[in-house]
Every structure is written in C-alpha cells, then in structure tokens.
Image (spheres, rainbow, N blue to C red):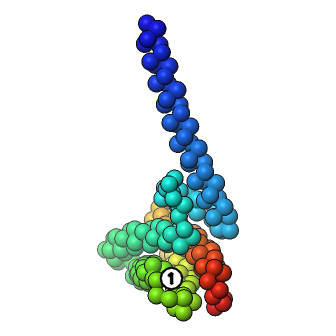
Amino acid sequence: MARNFLFFLVLFFTILGLFSTVVESLSRERVYLESQCRSAMYHDLCVQTLLPYMNKNAVPSPQRLAQISLASCLSKARVTRTYMNMLEKKLNQTGNSQDYQALEECVHQIDNGVDQITRSFKELQQMGTDGDENFVWHESNVMSWVSAALTDVTTCIDGITGDGIGRREKAMIKARFLNMKQLASNSLMMFTRFTTRYRASRGIKNP
C-alpha cells in the first residue's frame, strides 16, 4: 500500500514538474513575442499568429518572424480567394448582374492581393542573400506590394453593398477581408522592424 502511494506521489510530482516546465517555456515565448509585437496595430493577433511557430531551443530572428507573419497573411489570402471564387459562381447563377460585377471586381482585387503578397514573400526570402547593395531595393518592393494588397482589401470591403449578396455572405466576406487586412498590417510592422534592425547593423542608409 505504501509503495503504491509512493509511486503515485512520485508520478504526480513528475507530471507537475513537466507541466510547470511547459508553462514556463510558453510564458517566456509569449513574453518575447509581446515585446516583438508591441508596435503592431493588432497586437493580440500578432502574438497569436507567431506563437505556434516559437521554438524553445532557438529564438527566431526578426527576419524569420517577418517571414512567418507574411506567410500567415498569404495563407489567409489564398483561403479567402477560394471562398470568393465559390461565392462568385453562386451569385452568377442568380442572374443579379450588378452584384455579380461588384463581386467579380472584388475577386479581381483579391487575385491581385495574393499575387502581391506572394511576390513580397519571395522578395523577403532574398533579402540579405544577394548583397547589401540590393537590400533597399528589396525593401522598397515588399513595402509597395504589401501596401498595395492592403489597398485592394480595403476597396473590396467598401464595394460590397448590393442586396443580391446575402447578409450572411456579406458578413463572411467582411470578416475574412478584415482578418486579411489585419494580418497584412502586422506583417508590414514586423517587416519594418526587421529592416530597421538589419540596416542599423550593416550601416545601410534609410531608403
């Protein structure tokens, strides 16, 4: 009886110790991300986006955090595009030409947004690999493309007003595009944080 009690007691404290270690590790990672995301317009979303990719054995670099943030934005943009294409086909079957044209324009804008964010992600991966003389050029491209994607998203949200689009679909469109807009905004912040530190460490002048 005493042996069983001792066994379960040891097991309990072992599990408790492991749990405390995990909690402590997550707390450290969250504190780190809180500091990295402090300038983000959507702070909580920034931490929530990056936390699953934290590694307790290695602190991700500012460039890596910017890549993760932009990749998350790209993933959301692609999912949103798929939803919009499905909705466009559905609306086309109803014969409401005015609302269909508005949605078709929105699909065109999300296509542009996906393309711009894709190019931005590829450009970000090149930064620092082909010489400091090209860094500012890459930086300018990423800033321009992500900003253009933000504009496209905002234009689409403002253009969805017709009655032919159901209330539920309208709410879904706005929610998806708003989330994409927030992710893009946070990505710009993380990117700026990375480029500012990189330029300072290399003595590269501001663009």
Image coordinates for residue 130, horizontal then vertical, percent: 46, 87
Q: What residue is shown at x 68% (from left), y 68% (from top)? A: 39
Quadrant that contains the C terminus: bottom right
Q: How many numbered dots are placed on residues in this image?
A: 1
Q: What residue is shown at x 54% (from left), y 40% (from top)? A: 21
Viewer-nearest residue: 146 or 51: 51
Q: Is residue 118 above or below residue 173?
A: below
Image coordinates for residue 53, horizontal then vertical, percent: 48, 59
Viewer-nearest residue: 36 or 145: 36
Corner quadrant of residue 43: bottom right
Q: What residue is shown at x 54% (from left), y 60% (from top)? A: 59
Viewer-nearest residue: 154 or 158: 154
Q: Is residue 81 left or right of residue 56?
A: left
Viewer-nearest residue: 35 or 184: 35
Image coordinates for residue 149, horizontal then vertical, percent: 51, 81
Q: Is residue 136 above or below residue 191?
A: below
Q: Is residue 200 left or right of residue 13?
A: right
Q: Say which element carries label 1.
A: loop
Q: Is residue 151 visible?
A: no
Q: Is residue 191 left or right of residue 101?
A: right
Corner quadrant of residue 91: bottom left
| Mark 1 neighbour density, 10 Å: few (under 14) some (14–19) many (20 or more) | some
Q: Is residue 6 above or below residue 84?
A: above
Specify the amino acid type for callout 1: Gly
Q: What residue is shown at x 63% (from left), y 88% (from top)? A: 204
Q: Is residue 133 visible?
A: yes
Quadrant that contains the N terminus: top left
* Circle 1 residue: 128
In the orientation shown, which residue stands out farthest toward the top? Answer: 1
